[in-house]
Amino acid sequence: MRRKFTDEFDITIDDNFMVPETNDYDAFQDKVLLDKLRNEIIQSLIDNDIQNHESMDDFVKIQIDKIIEGYDLDSNERNYIYNLIDNEINGYGPLTELLKDKDITEIMVNGKDEVYIEIDGHLRRDGTTSFVNDDHIVRVIQRLVQPLGRTIDIAHPMVDARLDDGSRLNAVLPPLSLNGPVLTIRKFKKELANIDDFLRTGTLTPYMARFLEACVHSKLNILIVGGTGSGKTTLLNVLSSFCYKTERIITIEDAAELKLKQDHVISLETRTNNYEGTGMVTVRDLVINSLRMRPDRIIVGEVRGKEAFDMLQAMNTGHDGSMTTMHANGPTDALNRLETMVLMNGVEIPVTAIREYIENALDIVVQVRRFSDGRRRVTSISEIIGMQNGEIAIKEIFKFRQTGVLPNGDVVGEFLMHNYVPKVFDKIKAKGIDDIDDIFK
């Protein structure tokens, strides 16, 4: 019997073999030589069989020594090569160090030599990370998803999963991807933002923060909208922190990211099909089920389809204080999308009735946006004020207006409050909340 290198990923290299004094790419003066040796070693380990009598430690050491023989490498350079191979066997290949880096919030692999990372909202190409070939990328993806009970191959060329640390992974293989294997990892931040962080970084103003807190306390229904990576889920998590500790809160997500600190929180997560193509549980299934769980609040990470109707139904049937997010360019676009999602259910309801249904369900729409400098700001807080000429009427309360861009790329602007007392102010006052009176005086 002969064993392949790929079957032995979980074997730990002996400490005497790996001496990780450095893992610095700069240890190699000759980067061309580094890439040549790395590629040859990894390809050799993949292509060659391990004899039954050989241990993984001996096999790897023999292969490495055979390839680097004749090259004048110092100890740091040899250790760097050894660490690269250790990452292949005990880590996640070229992504190992990127996954450990707390400053990196997103990792995108578009090809063997095309890896992008996001730091502080800025996307840049990582010139020190590369793969040997497409098979190497696929092998790393499989190593990431196999412990989760997931698979990716020709028969299942797409996978969406949550890693053990909460990070979200998405991978697509050919023929779905025309550029070869594509991997995207949105890393989970253990230290989640709070309202003080938002105020310190200029995401919103104290008036806006106090108003949103009062909206949550008075159990208004809130919709957060924005583009991909705009910070919708982060803002939802911050607003959720305003919920009272005595409330029973049910959260529903595709991939669990919300981390509420209240005592009585039930977290539900969707499930995809198993190997037999059965067992899927959708957001809509969980929303319907949550109504039977006596929730004080229902918080849905994101609505994308038919579940929007059930979410609105919950808001309209006494489950006040519900919150959710949606991909949209602004409040008006969000309401149009909600209308379309309700129609996706095939319900035979006049469009005017659907709009009245949405208008009765929602109170506040908050828009968040990521600007060109990487900073995220709440650009609009609006309220639903009723129906006008068969359309849902929206009135803006707060806004952010961009006024320019500095030479260093920083976006500058100003937060504005309209000379307008919102209708929801009466609802807030009716709940006995009067600590925002000064804002609208």
Image (cartoon, rainbow, N blue to C red):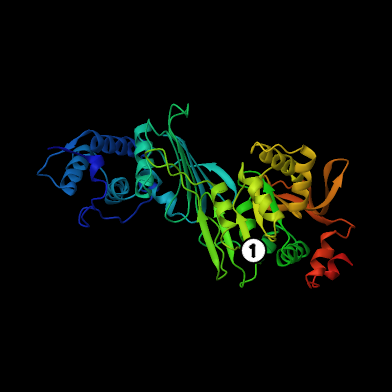
Residue 370 visible? The answer is no
Residue drawn at (73%, 48%) of the image: 406
Q: Secondary structure at mark 1?
A: helix
427 or 125, nearer to the observer: 427
**Kind of residue at badge 1:** Asp
Q: Nearer the viewer, residue 302 or 112?
A: 302
Please state if 61 lies on the left or on the right of 288 as rendered. left
Q: Is residue 3 left or right of residue 84?
A: left
Residue 38 image position (x, y, % from top left) = 31, 39
Q: Quadrant of the C terminus?
A: bottom right
Residue at 85%, 70% in the rendered image? 438
Picture coordinates of residue 262 (x, y %)? 57, 69
Between 17 and 72, the one lying in front of the other is 17
Residue 24 in sight in this render: yes
Q: Is residue 196 above or below residue 48?
A: below
Residue ID at (65%, 70%): 244
Q: Position of residue 360 (x, y in %)?
A: 77, 52
**Quick check: 77 left or right of 259?**
left
Q: In which image quadrant can residue 112 be found?
A: top left
x, y percentage for residue 351? 77, 38
Please say if 133 is above or below 280.
above
Left or right: where does residue 20 sit relative to residue 14? right
Residue under numbered circle 1:
197
Q: Residue at x 26, y 46 (%)?
A: 9
Q: Which residue ends up furthest to the left in the rendered image?
A: 53
Q: How many marks?
A: 1
